[in-house]
């Protein structure tokens, strides 16, 4: 088949994908500081989730289905919002003023304000752009899988009601139920949470901006799954924040939700399976992201532009216990499999530096 000619000698199977090469060049240079796996990448990846997860298939209007209509009505009354959202539709960017009223979206306004100029300039939809920026961004993190990217989401959306985005102080029961409602099994929550290997917090403890969730926030490695299973020993700050629990390393931040899901019988075995298996983690993350990126959309209506996404570098370090820790510090929680053997890194106890703001 003849391929469409795109800018700078590149080509694509479908002509509609060409614009994404131009968006790629622009955001690598002007959003991601020349292709780094830093703060903007982390925030962009988080945004793919916050646009997607405000979705609940129980509530779309289906004429003729009285019971669905009734459930929707009851739901909308409970959230006090007359309109329902269709996920990965860019509503978080189109209706930032409304969706930012949801406490769970605290902080995403910064990356939305950075990003908005790019879809406007290149005339692509907000929903497409948010998923594209997440896929390109995480490709800058060594060890990441090359994510799928499908284009063609409409640029119309309704604001999502509050209450659908999980909070770090939610119980495992509540988080698992919320994901189930959006169509995800417990294992898939764990798969998606591989994202927290390239992540830091700014707003759970506002006084400690950029505090990472693992010791290597610039690398898409398995350290997040190891370090969340270590016994918590101290808070990086004063510990008074809702949604935070003690972390094992100086300068590291631990979300209560990550702590719970690492140890819950419904999610612990998937969690542990990633501890020394980069390939499994990357494969499962890719599959779960493919699913999340088209929540509320129909795959058949979209064009596959995955070839525009860069190929990530492989990870160079191997999974290890942070220096200063021993196997006795691991709180293994999967009853059907032993915790895999890990070597301890040499040297003085690991401490973790913040992700610099950009
Ligand atoms: C159980 C569900 C989840 C909860 C409760 C949760 C909670 C959080 C919280 C509280 C933060 C810190 C935000 C801040 O203070 O700046 C955060 C950061 C982050 N989350 Fe999640 N998250 C969840 C699932 C996900 C998923 C599915 C993704 C995937 C795509 C994701 C990607 C990220 C990323 C990349 C960051 C880092 C942002 C940065 O460094 O600026 N999270 N998450
Ligand atoms: Mn941040």
Image (cartoon, rainbow, N blue to C red):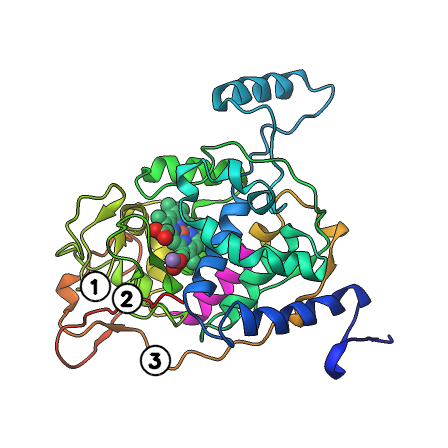
Please determine whether, in this image, residue 66 is positioned above or below residue 117. above
Residue at position x 68%, y 61% in the image: 121
Q: Going by the picture, which residue comes out furthest to the right?
A: 2
Using residue 235 as the reference point, say whether residue 199 is left or right of it: right
Which residue, given by chain and number where applicable, does mark 1 sit on?
251
Kindly state the secondary structure of the residue where label 2 is placed.
loop
Evaluate if marks 2 and 1 touch, with contact meaning CB atoms under 8 Å apart: yes
Closer mark to the observer between disc 3 and disc 2: 2
Mark 2 beta carbon near ligand 2 (under 8 Å) = no
Residue at position x 12%, y 56% in the image: 233
First-in-chain label (3 vs 1): 1
- Quadrant of the image containing the N terminus: bottom right
* Residue 223 among magenta residues: no
User: Where is residue 58 drawn, in percent x and y?
Assistant: 58, 29
Kindly state the secondary structure of the residue where label 1 is placed.
loop
Which residue, given by chain and number where applicable, does mark 2 sit on?
354
Nearer to the camera, 189 or 112: 112
Which residue, given by chain and number where applicable, does mark 3 sit on?
317
Question: Which range of residues does the magenta coloring cover?
Answer: 277-289
First-in-chain label (2 vs 1): 1
Q: CA distance from mark 3 to mark 2?
A: 20 Å
Q: CA distance from mark 2 to mark 1?
A: 7 Å
User: Where is residue 199 drawn, in percent x and y?
Assistant: 37, 61
Q: Is residue 156 visible?
A: yes
Evaluate if marks 3 and 1 touch, with contact meaning CB atoms under 8 Å apart: no
Mark 1 beta carbon near ligand 1 (under 8 Å) = no
Q: Which picture quadrant has residue 319?
A: bottom left
User: Where is residue 241 drawn, in percent x and y?
Assistant: 22, 44
Please determine whether, in this image, residue 303 is positioned above or below residue 18. above
- Quadrant of the image containing the C terminus: bottom left
How crowded pointer 1 is (Cα within 10 Å; few <14, some 14-19, many 20+) is rated as many
């Amino acid at each position: 088949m003849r391929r469409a000619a795109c800018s700078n000698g590149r080509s694509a199977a479908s002509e509609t994908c060409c614009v994404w090469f131009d968006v790629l060049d622009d955001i690598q240079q002007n959003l991601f500081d020349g292709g780094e796996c830093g703060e903007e990448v982390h925030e962009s990846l988080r945004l793919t989730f916050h646009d997607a997860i405000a979705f609940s298939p129980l509530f779309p209007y289906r004429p003729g289905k009285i019971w669905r209509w009734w459930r929707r009505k009851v739901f909308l009354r409970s959230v006090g919002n007359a309109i329902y959202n269709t996920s990965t539709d860019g509503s978080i960017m189109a209706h930032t003023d409304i969706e930012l009223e949801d406490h769970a979206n605290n902080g995403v306004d910064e990356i939305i304000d950075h990003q908005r100029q790019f879809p406007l300039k290149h005339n692509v939809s907000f929903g497409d752009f948010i998923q594209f920026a997440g896929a390109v961004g995480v490709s800058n993190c060594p060890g990441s899988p090359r994510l799928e990217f499908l284009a063609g989401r409409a640029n119309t959306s309704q604001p999502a009601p509050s209450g659908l985005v999980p909070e770090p102080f939610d119980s495992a029961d509540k988080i698992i139920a919320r994901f189930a409602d959006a169509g995800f099994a417990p294992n898939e929550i764990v798969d998606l949470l591989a994202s927290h290997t390239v992540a830091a917090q700014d707003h759970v403890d506002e006084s400690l901006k950029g505090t990472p969730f693992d010791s290597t926030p610039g690398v898409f490695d398995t350290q997040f799954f190891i370090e969340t299973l270590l016994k918590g020993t101290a808070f990086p700050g004063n510990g008074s924040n809702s949604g935070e629990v003690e972390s094992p390393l100086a300068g590291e931040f631990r979300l209560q939700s990550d702590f719970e899901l690492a140890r819950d019988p419904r999610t612990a075995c998937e969690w542990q399976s990633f501890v020394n298996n980069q390939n499994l983690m990357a494969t499962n993350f890719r599959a779960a992201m493919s699913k999340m990126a088209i929540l509320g959309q129909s795959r058949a209506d979209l064009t596959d532009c995955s070839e525009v996404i860069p190929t990530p570098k492989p990870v160079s370090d191997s999974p290890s216990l942070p220096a200063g820790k021993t196997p006795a510090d691991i709180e293994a929680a999967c009853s059907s499999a032993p915790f895999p053997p890990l070597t301890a890194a040499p040297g003085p106890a690991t401490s973790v530096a913040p992700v610099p703001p950009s």
